[in-house]
């Protein structure tokens, strides 16, 4: 039921937005309809909700509200209202203005969302905060700010998340008046509070708070909270180079898997080759050595190729795949034969990575074998994706993929 609710809502959201181009070019819409001036409020609302990053936020909010509701019937009533508005938006964009007007327009949806901010159900309050944040309407900043206040809460206070969503929403609408209240949340023992505050400061572009955000990484009170948002903030604000010491401390620490990984790739993003020796220390970590190999490859740290190659026979198939890819990026032709042995690995994804590595190495003697392994996925455009590395090195991974495409096209020409 939860899954069907999300699919249904996302369908209508997609319908409302994807049909934008279709409506503009639809000859069956009368000239009177096409020339009718659209409400600027509606246009602005639609444009903001069309942005992929906002769609992602909305998807997350929908997932939460359909998995953490207090009362199913009430949750469904709220989502039915929300869906009705988006059905009306879809019709509005096709020239049927009456459907949305019947609901009172976007203004009424925002007012309804403001009412939901006072709902007894936290998931609905958080959902409403996201809607208002994406809407960009500063009129509702005071309503959102009310959720930042301390209040009595039944249950585990560590899982309060509507406060963090409200902070994020204030950032989305650019309500800088509330920055002091948001910065205060950086000290919260609640991870969701801190995440929301960091996101908000990112939306504000408040790089002057980089030190306060970086302190989250090394605060002993938060050492068990796996949260990469401070690292993403520092990278986005272009202040991360001032906090390499903190990155290394986190990377070589324990417990926080995603945070440690983000710290490693942030160093790769920085081209911090002087810290290659610190990354190489993770070769002793069975959970991170594959990522360490790739991060060093992205730094072009060829001096570690021999140590990396030792992991080609690792018992962990993920490590074998990562190692092959790292050697491919480094163009470590010394190990072409060893990488080629993985073309018969029991795991298909390891075989794919081995073939990819051979193509990146431009190992012409193995082109035919490599093409046989990856021809189908590559012909369908399934090359390396950002997930093969990390979002923080997306630009580097795109360049590697471009090089891979060229090698693949050349390899196919060999008879």
Image (cartoon, rainbow, N blue to C red):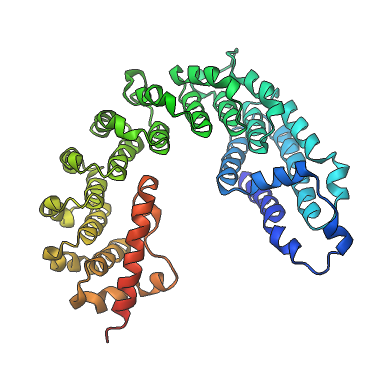
Q: Residue furthest bottom?
A: 415
Tell me the quadrant of the picture where the C terminus can be found: bottom left
Q: Which of the pair 324/229 is nearer the observer?
A: 229
Percent across and percent down for residue 21 are 69, 61
Q: Which of the pair 175/161 is nearer the observer?
A: 175
State left or right for residue 406 relative to residue 18.
left
Q: Which of the pair 243/105 is nearer the observer?
A: 243
Tell me the quadrant of the picture where the N terminus can be found: top right
Percent across and percent down for residue 179 are 54, 21
Residue at image point 35% right, 18% down:
221
Residue 188 in view (yes/no): yes
Residue 156 in view (yes/no): no
Q: Image quarter for residue 49?
A: top right
In this rendering, the answer to whether 301 lies above or below 248 is: below
Residue at image point 58% right, 20% down:
178
State left or right for residue 15 relative to residue 333.
right
Q: Image quarter for residue 208?
A: top left
In this rendering, the answer to whether 166 lies above or below 34 is: above
Residue at image point 86% right, 44% down:
101
State left or right for residue 82 relative to residue 254.
right
Residue at image point 62% right, 32% down:
173
In this rendering, the answer to whether 320 lies above or below 404 is: above
């Amino acid at each position: 039921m939860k899954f069907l609710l999300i699919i249904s809502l996302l369908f209508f959201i997609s319908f409302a937005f994807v049909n934008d181009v279709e409506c503009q070019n639809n000859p069956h819409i009368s000239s009177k309809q096409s020339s009718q001036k659209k409400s600027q409020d509606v246009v602005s609302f639609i444009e903001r909700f069309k942005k992929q990053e906002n769609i992602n936020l909305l998807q997350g909010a929908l997932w939460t509200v359909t998995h953490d509701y207090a009362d199913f019937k009430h949750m469904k009533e709220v989502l039915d209202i929300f869906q009705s508005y988006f059905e009306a938006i879809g019709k509005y964009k096709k020239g049927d203005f009456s459907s949305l007007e019947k609901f009172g327009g976007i203004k009424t949806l925002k007012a309804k969302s403001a009412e939901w901010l006072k709902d007894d159900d936290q998931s609905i309050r958080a959902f409403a905060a996201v809607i208002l944040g994406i809407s960009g309407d500063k009129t509702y900043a005071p309503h959102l700010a009310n959720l930042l206040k301390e209040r009595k809460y039944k249950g585990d206070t560590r899982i309060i998340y509507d406060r963090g969503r409200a902070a994020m929403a204030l950032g989305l609408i650019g309500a800088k008046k509330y920055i002091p209240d948001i910065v205060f949340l950086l000290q919260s023992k609640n991870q969701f509070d801190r995440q929301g505050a960091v996101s908000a400061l990112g939306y504000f572009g408040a790089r002057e708070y980089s030190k306060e955000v970086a302190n989250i990484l090394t605060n002993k009170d938060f050492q068990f909270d796996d949260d990469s948002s401070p690292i993403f903030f520092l990278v986005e604000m272009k202040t991360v180079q001032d906090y390499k010491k903190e990155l290394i401390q986190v990377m070589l620490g324990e417990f926080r898997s995603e945070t440690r990984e983000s710290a490693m790739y942030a160093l790769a993003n920085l081209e911090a080759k002087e810290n290659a020796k610190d990354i190489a220390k993770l070769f002793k970590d069975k959970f991170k050595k594959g990522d360490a190999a790739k991060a060093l490859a992205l730094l072009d740290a060829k001096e570690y190729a021999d140590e990396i190659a030792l992991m080609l026979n690792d018992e962990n198939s993920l490590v074998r795949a990562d190692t092959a890819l790292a050697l491919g990026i480094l163009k470590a032709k010394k190990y072409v034969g060893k990488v080629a042995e993985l073309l018969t690995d029991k795991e298909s994804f390891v075989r794919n990575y081995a073939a990819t590595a051979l193509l990146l190495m431009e190992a012409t003697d193995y082109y035919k074998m490599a093409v046989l392994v990856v021809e189908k996925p590559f012909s369908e455009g399934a090359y390396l994706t950002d997930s093969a590395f990390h979002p923080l090195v997306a630009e580097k991974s795109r360049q590697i993929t471009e090089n891979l495409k060229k090698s693949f096209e050349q390899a196919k020409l060999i008879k």
